[in-house]
Image (spheres, grey):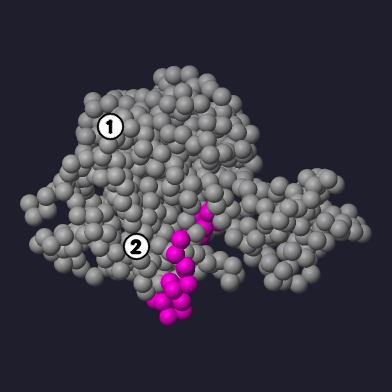
Amino acid sequence: MQNPSPRLDRNNIADIYPLAPMQEGLLFHSISAPDDGLYMPQTALRITGEVNSTALRAAWQDALDRHPILRSGFFWEQRDEPFQIAFRQIPVAFTTLDWTQADPAAEKQRLSDLFSANRAQPFDLRRPPLIRIQWIKTGENRSIMVVCYHHIILDGWSIRQLLDEVLQLYRRSAGFVAVSLAPARPYGDYIGWLKTRDRSGSLRFWHERLAGFESATRLLAAQSTASFAPTSFERQRLELPVSVHQAMLAYSARSGLTLNTLLQGALALLIASQTGSQDLVFGTTTAGRPATLDGATTMIGLFINTLPVRIRIEKAQPLSAWLAALQIAHAQTSEHDYVPLAGIQGSGTSLFDTLLVVENFATSQKTGNAALPLKTDGIDFDERTHFPLTLWAMPHSAGLTFMAGFSRDILSPETAFALLERLVSILSAMLSASEPTLAAFIEEMPAPIEGAGLADPGSTVSIGARPLDPLPSGHQPSATEAALAKIWAEVLKCGPLDGHANFFELGGHSLLAARVVSRIRAEFGVPVPVRALFEQPVLAALAHHVERLCAPHVTPEGHIEIEI
């Protein structure tokens, strides 16, 4: 491993700026569970044609030189607020492998093993580059280019653009005729744009949208989601039948409804049928590229955000009108889609356990060029999130692929696949329905799916932090409470605290919560997860929780990793 000192030298610093909201969230999850392999997407691009690996390496170095975000590291211990540093020069991490002796089955297994090996080598966010390239020769004029990166620097839209750009840079480095690329707009310009937003006004928008939503409906059993284990992550895939895909395209053309709207409606009806809820929330990702920022669609970096989607089942409303209202409601969020999820849902229980990701890329894959004797033959990808259930919808030239990412500790593969099948059947029924009301449509839906890990109908979870009973008159803080008060005061840089102190009202946030929990675990030697501070943000309540966990025989043994 290279000595990081040259790249971290003060003279090598090009720029320093804060993190985007989504970057803050990913940083929190990364330092809370550093070895889980979360948010380390991998893209495998299959290439046909002779590849000059030296020229390919040079093309990737040119890409790093063009985009400061690819040369950025992230720091959170030196200041109260995390920041990122873009360095002037960072060498590309590029390796070559030879799989020419592997048959197709062995090649597939090797690729799966490589994905696993990459996840087992998490990035140190303070040591850029946070992107690794592996070029694998698989046969005569056949190869695979694997790009592994931390999500904190790139989103799905950006990685596709970056791959196209690298192929153009390869033309030049390999000696082919190439068109010069326009100067890249740096990601720091987006950070500057964020500073111009009315964040308090956007928070009001979200709080008004969620007003009255007090009990989160769970598609999955609450006791299962609490023990979500990323190490048991699995995926199930289902191709949308061609006939349904064609019907969907025709329906969208007639109605003006987008794929995102149709899928949000189908998922809402799935959750409603499983839980009996008439007012529900699930998560979705947004592209996050502001129309008011020139060149945003061509910038490379992390722009996506995870946001709540609140949907009410208005049974008397016609299905088509309900879908149209969903699309209008989603469009209204465009001015406020930069707000971090933590700011929207606060310090209580998570608003949702299911995330919907509708991939929407600005560029199409290149199939070759007369001046460049190679073409791309498809993309494999590997990604996992911290959400108990993530549903992906991935449009491609031949149709639409659905995928479910989940933990085997929560759902069986059969149950996860059944959820995908039910989602497709609801979508198909929506497309063929003849203007029914929602009540009539739901009446025709099959019985709820039964499976381990699915919530019982009608089960809800309070989304607010549990209030603390009033402290009795003359309350004397315990030794635990006094020790916690000292930790809080040092981390929050505030004065003396009493049992009523609320961590988040004092300015605490997710990264400071991670510091506090790390200190608690080191001092008390108990396995306190980060979520405990979000569920017990009041000092006396947290002290009581820690006391219940304490046991005389437990002693700290050096540094203990944080669980979430």
Percent position (x, y) of residue 167? 21, 56
Q: Which residue is mark 2?
A: 92
Q: Earlier in the sequence, mark 2 or mark 1?
A: 2
Q: Which residues are magenta?
A: 1-30
Could you say whether the residue bearing mark 2 is in a helix, strand or loop? loop
Q: Residue at x 16, y 46 (%)?
A: 49
Check disc 1: other Cα within 10 Å, few if <14, some if 14-19, many if 20+. few
Q: Is residue 355 left or right of residue 45?
A: right
* Residue sitting at the far left: 370
Q: Answer whether labels 2 and 1 touch (C-beta < 8 Å).
A: no
Decide which of 458, 525 is in the foreground and name it: 525
**Left or right: where 125 falls relative to 158:** right
The amino acid marked with disc number 2 is Val
232 or 2: nearer the viewer? 2
Mark whose residue sits in front, 2 or 1? 1
Kindly identify the residue that appears in the image at 33 percent across and 54 percent down: 95
In this view, which residue lies farthest toward the bottom?
A: 11
Residue under the image location 41 percent in, 39 percent down: 113
**Residue 216 lies in what quarter of the image?**
top right
* Closer-to-camera residue (43/483): 43
Q: Tag 1: residue type?
A: Asp
Residue 93: x %, y % from top left: 36, 59
Residue 300, image x and y in percent? 32, 61
